[in-house]
Amino acid sequence: MSGRGPIMIVAGTRPEAIKLAPVFWSLDKLGIDYVFVWSGQHYDYEMSRIFFDQLGLPEPVIDLDVRSGSHVEQTARIMMGLEKAVEKYKPSIVVAQGDTNTVVATALTSTKMLVPFAHVEAGLRSWDRTMPEEINRIIADAIAEIHFAPTELSAINLMHEGIPLRKIHITGNTVVDVVYKYRDYVAKEGEKLLSELSLKPLSYVLVTVHRQENTDNPNRLENIVKALIEISKHYTIVFPAHPRTVNRLQSCGLWSSLASRKNIRILKPLGYFQFLGLLMKCLIVLTDSGGVQEEACTLKIPTLTLRYNTERPETVLVGINKVVGVEAQKIVDEALKTIDMKDTIVANTKSVQNPLGDGRAGERIGKILKEAVEQGIQVETIDSQEDPYITYAILENVFRSSNNSKELLRIGDIVAMYDNNGVAVADPSKARRIVIRLPRTETYKIEGTDQGSSHT
Ligand code: UD1
Ligand code: UDP
């Protein structure tokens, strides 16, 4: 099925529209032929088209208009629609970003139709398999032919799930490109919105909540509401609410207790420039969003993550994000403490490099996609008539010279690398010991290594 047709980019939710924008910009710059398919998982103007308009996305060739439904319905409808689109456009590669139902449906459809799938933001893991997003990410990564890992940690996660190094590209996160491109402009947008709301910069706490494990669990949702009410006795809360959250607050009878508070400003979902503008000017942000954790880290805004885990550990390691769970009192205590310590937290991270990227992720992704198309990438297959099965071997001190690394890459696929301390790395220059996957009958001896191995 894989042809030499255009690259097909598939998206369907707010964060995908935002985070794929730099890939579109890059493909445009490189003059590469592509088509854009929108699944329609998000469909309200302020959850979808507003981002096309603000970030300069092209008009989709198809809007599958799948809308809401159970996970199974939504995923299945996307797959059925996408199958027709792939038949029609015969893409050379299909690209999707992130961990939504749109992404898992895209990965499955494209790979089953033998079109290579490329995953932007590959390798993130929360290690929580009750999260729909974790399942979506694991499946998409397991079958992707190209993995655009935003960080070294995400690349290491992929290798430990058996993805060979040659399929992984550490690019940085595309959201950093978007933030860097617009941060000066959105600062003005933020000020405009604040004056409309009669609020001063650095006088409010910004909140976003939409994740299934928080909104669909009435106890958790009530805890969050209690915490917000308590914090609002000290600081104004600005809460642009996801439609899912509004629905659940209403059906759980929690809406009026929140909406009636003078110091809690519930807003409709905001456009990107407005939201980022508010993020830049807030005291701290309370969120369960993935993208907001990343943007806050990039802008050095102290963040409390209202979850028990995060697939963005880099933001925690850098000291700007804290995973605080969803117990009401804990949220309140942490929020008040973090506001008090804000200057110190920000000062401590001032000189630290953004762990999520340098603003050039889209550029790198565009170039790699171009090369893959030129080289005629296919879904991987193997002819094992000569070498009937595959095994794994450990080699030590392998990258002492560049010749060694070339030789190794010829022999087998690197699926793990460890440094002098035995800690996993994704950078060959730091590797002392590697695990390779190779045909069982291959005989090899690497010159200049401590250890040659031989299998017959
Ligand atoms: C989805 C993703 C989540 C991502 C989020 C980004 C999955 C499993 N979840 O969650 O990973 O973080 O998008 O925002 O793919 N709704 C509207 N209008 C819209 C869209 C949604 O009213 O335009 C309401 C509907 O009531 C719908 C609910 O929001 O049932 C949930 O929408 P859905 O796309 O299923 O999941 P999200 O919670 O948005
Ligand atoms: N965002 C926005 N308007 C809002 C809230 C969020 O534009 O009112 C942006 C935010 O800047 C981030 C993205 O939406 O880039 C995050 O989307 P969301 O939290 O819905 O999804 P997640 O990132 O958790 O998948």
Image: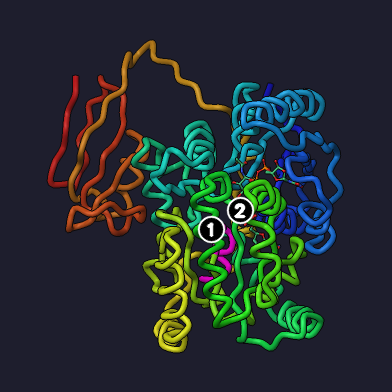
> What residue range appears in magenta?
287-297
Residue in front for this viewpoint, 61 or 215: 215
Secondary structure under tag 2 reads loop
Image-quadrant location for residue 52:
bottom right
Residue in front for this viewpoint, 116 or 456: 116
Q: Which mark is residue 288?
A: 1
Q: Is mark 2 within 8 Å of ligand 1?
A: yes
Q: What is the total number of numbered labels drawn onto the structure image? A: 2
User: Ligand 1, what quadrant?
Assistant: top right
From where the camera sits, is residue 388 visible?
yes
Q: Residue at x 61, y 72 (%)?
A: 206
Q: Which residue is denoted by mark 2 in the rendering? A: 210
Q: Is mark 1 within 8 Å of ligand 2?
A: yes
Asked whether residue 410 is drawn in magenta, I would say no
Q: Residue at x 47, y 37 (%)?
A: 138
Mark 1: amino acid = Asp
Question: Residue at the top extreme?
Answer: 385
Q: How is the image coloured?
A: rainbow
